[in-house]
Amino acid sequence: MGKIKVILNRESNTLDVWFDEPEKEFISEETGEEVILKKDKNNRVIGFEKLNLLSGKENVPIEVLTT
């Protein structure tokens, strides 16, 4: 796996996480839990979007773990 791209958009209040290139997105699927799965032409999940991430102007604590 290559790099993971994480985008926090305060304006739209969303968090996007990409495991592959966003340009490969072919279809998206809502899970019903304010999460949208981004899929490529082979129906493989290449990312996801979390809607309504923050309830206010709070900071987002980030922890990065590698193994």
Image: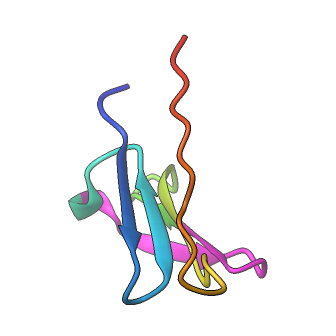
- Location of the N terminus by quadrant is top left
> Is the residue 31 above or below the residue 18 in the image?
below
Q: In terms of depth relative to the viewer, which is nearer, 49 or 40? A: 49
In the picture as drawn, the residue positioned furthest to the right comes out as 33
Q: Position of residue 17 (x, y in %)?
A: 45, 55
Residue at point 30%, 28% (across, down): 2
In the picture as drawn, the residue positioned furthest to the front comes out as 58
Q: Position of residue 40 (x, y in %)?
A: 40, 58
> As drawn, is 32 to the left or to the right of 54?
right
Q: Is residue 27 magenta?
A: yes
Residue at point 49%, 84% (across, down): 13
> Is the residue 46 above or below the residue 55 in the image?
above
In the picture as drawn, the residue positioned furthest to the left comes out as 23
- Location of the C terminus by quadrant is top right
> As drawn, is 47 to the left or to the right of 34?
left
Q: In terms of depth relative to the viewer, which is nearer, 39 or 36? A: 36
Q: Position of residue 33 (x, y in %)?
A: 78, 77
Write the start and end of the magenta stretch as one range.
24-37
Q: Position of residue 9 (x, y in %)?
A: 37, 76
